[in-house]
Image (cartoon, rainbow, N blue to C red):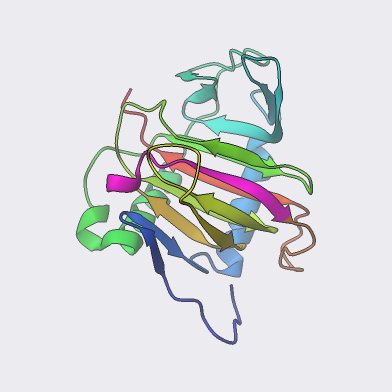
């Protein structure tokens, strides 16, 4: 975050899982927020996802490039209005490559499969995300996660089960989290957000999480 008295250094939470605080400055956060607001508009806009057991996720989601539904991807919003999914903009792919380079080194961010999926999740004050793995992609490329708005507790676990051991990380607005390699299939979730912690000048109530992935499809 701009103006931090004591800048927070990058931290490797687990092998291949790196938290980079304050990666997006205030101007970049505002640009990304405005883009999210455009993507959230119908058709193929922000929706509530219903799980196969009939339950509804507490976050609301809009997808770019490929539409995620439990448990797969489609080119249309098959569990919503049926509209074609919004395109994945090239600048998001560049942002993902820059994020990977920041986490692993410049060489890691060059080349490789192009990023082609974005899941934008909106958390209100009561929303949370249960422990899960990002396992519907055919690619093992690192997952890139960007945070806007309210701070959250991000729980990063192990690759074997939803149970301990795990590490709780505080993700603030502008933070970057990348997980790949041996941590690509780790369980992770958001047990809670901290309402009212968004930067005052951002103009966002709640939290947005932008997750960038390579589909391999």
Q: Position of residue 140 (x, y in %)?
A: 29, 36
29 versus 90 height, above or below: below
Number of disc labels: 0
Figure quadrant of residue 62: top right
Q: Quadrant of the C terminus?
A: top left
| Place of residue 84 in the rendered image (x, y in percent of width and height, measured from the top left) | 56, 18
Between 210 and 6, the one nearer to me in the picture: 6
Q: Quadrant of residue 151?
A: bottom right
Q: Quadrant of the N terminus?
A: bottom right
Camera-nearest residue between 82 and 164: 164
Q: Which residues are magenta?
A: 182-193
Q: Which residue is pictured at 41% across the width and 68% down the height?
A: 11
> In the image shown, does 136 or 118 lie closer to the viewer?
136
Image height check: is 40 above or below 176?
above
Q: Is residue 144 above or below residue 168?
A: above
Q: Is residue 207 left or right of residue 170?
A: right
């Amino acid at each position: 975050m701009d103006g931090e008295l004591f800048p927070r250094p990058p931290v490797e939470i687990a092998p291949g899982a790196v938290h980079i605080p304050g990666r997006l400055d205030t101007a970049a956060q505002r640009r990304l927020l405005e883009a999210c607001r455009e993507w959230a508009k119908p058709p193929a806009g922000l929706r509530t996802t219903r799980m196969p057991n009939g339950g509804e996720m507490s976050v609301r989601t809009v997808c770019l490039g490929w539409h995620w539904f439990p448990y797969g991807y489609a080119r249309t919003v098959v569990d919503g209005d049926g509209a074609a999914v919004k395109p994945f903009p090239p600048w998001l792919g560049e942002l993902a490559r820059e994020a990977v380079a920041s986490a692993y080194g410049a060489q890691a961010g060059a080349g490789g499969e192009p990023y082609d999926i974005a899941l934008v999740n909106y958390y209100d004050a009561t929303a949370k995300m249960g422990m899960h793995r990002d396992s519907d992609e055919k690619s093992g490329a690192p997952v890139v996660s960007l945070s806007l708005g309210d701070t959250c507790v991000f729980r990063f676990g192990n690759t074997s089960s939803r149970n301990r051991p795990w590490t709780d990380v505080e993700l603030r607005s502008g933070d970057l989290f990348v997980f790949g390699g041996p941590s690509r299939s780790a369980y992770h979730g958001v047990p809670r957000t901290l309402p009212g912690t968004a930067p005052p000048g951002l103009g966002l109530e709640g939290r947005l999480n932008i997750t960038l992935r390579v589909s391999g499809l």
